[in-house]
Image (cartoon, helix red, strand yellow):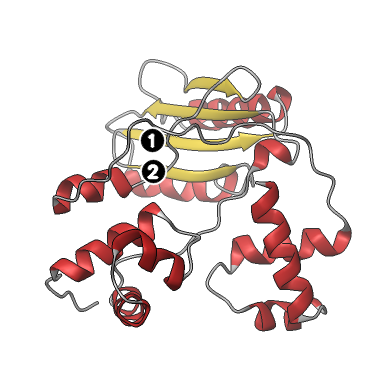
Amino acid sequence: MRRIKLTEREKLTLYGITRFPSHTNRELSEQINLSTSTIASIRRRLYKNGYFKPLNVPMVQNLGCELLAIIYTNFNPISPLEERIKVTGKTIEVFEEIFLSIGERDRGFSLSFSRDYTTIGKINDIRTEIFGKRELLEDEYPNMVLFPFDISKIYRFFDFSSLLGAYFGINNGRKSVKEEFERSKLFNLSDSEKKVYAMLIKHPNSSDAWMGSKIGVSRHTVSKMKRKFRESN
């Protein structure tokens, strides 16, 4: 991947894309005082050179998930890293609830969303049993911390805009930090809405027409549902 030195306009645009990810080029233009054409050109260039990757994050707390789980593990330093990767790849990482997993020779860390405690507890039990049998653990079992959405507040969730603002010397003008993942109400999606929703998460940078062709609905239907999802949070 070719790296380029960012100009001041490119820094400002990258910050703006990160701070206002759902804004159109025209809406972003009003926020960072650059022309729409300039933002469009810079956005394409930054994406092509790998400076950002669009993601759609599902608001799972409104789709039936009850908690966020953090699990971290200290591994036996004499256990081969290759063996642990092989074991976890076949038995642990296959669970759909895990959306972030990081590991190195001595430690492992994962984030998961779960519909209930029973599900995430089962995953941790399997993890402990497998690691224990293979003597991959050091002195203690995997540690698990749970944050139920009903009683927890998440103020930042993979929001890199403040970090970029500080790094680029851009004053973001924030007076407070907005709460994320606030539970509003439980949504019951139709079969068509579930298909569109899943496509938006899996293919965040694809066009509405392309997604519609893959699941058998019109571009207009995809666009309409996309607006509904965003407005409903």
* Of residues 70 and 149, the one drawn nearer to the viewer in this rendering: 149
Q: Is residue 53 visible?
A: no
Q: SS class of the residue under badge 1? A: strand
Dot 1 surroundings within 10 Å: few (below 14), some, or many (20 or more)? Answer: some
Residue at 64% over, 64% down? 200
- 170, above or below 179, in the image: below
Circle 1 residue: 108
Going from N to C along the chain, the mark reached first, 2 or 1, is 2
Label 2, label 1: how far apart the Cα atoms are: 6 Å
- Name the mark on residue 174: none
Residue at 39% over, 32% down? 177
Q: SS class of the residue under badge 2? A: strand
Q: How many numbered markers are drawn?
A: 2
Quarter of the image for residue 53 reads: bottom left
Asked if the residue at tag 1 contacts the one at tag 2, i.e. Cβ–Cβ closer than 8 Å, the answer is yes
Residue at 57% over, 26% down? 129
Quarter of the image for residue 126 reads: top right
Circle 2 residue: 102
Quarter of the image for residue 166 reads: top left
- 125, above or below 4, in the image: above
Point out residue 123 in the picture as x, y percentages from the top left corner: 63, 32
Point out residue 131 in the picture as x, y percentages from the top left corner: 49, 31
Dot 2 surroundings within 10 Å: few (below 14), some, or many (20 or more)? Answer: few
The amino acid on which the numbered mark 2 sits, given as a three-letter code, is Ile
* Of residues 63 and 36, the one drawn nearer to the viewer in this rendering: 36
The amino acid on which the numbered mark 1 sits, given as a three-letter code, is Gly
Point out residue 85 in the picture as x, y percentages from the top left corner: 42, 48
Q: Is residue 48 visible?
A: yes
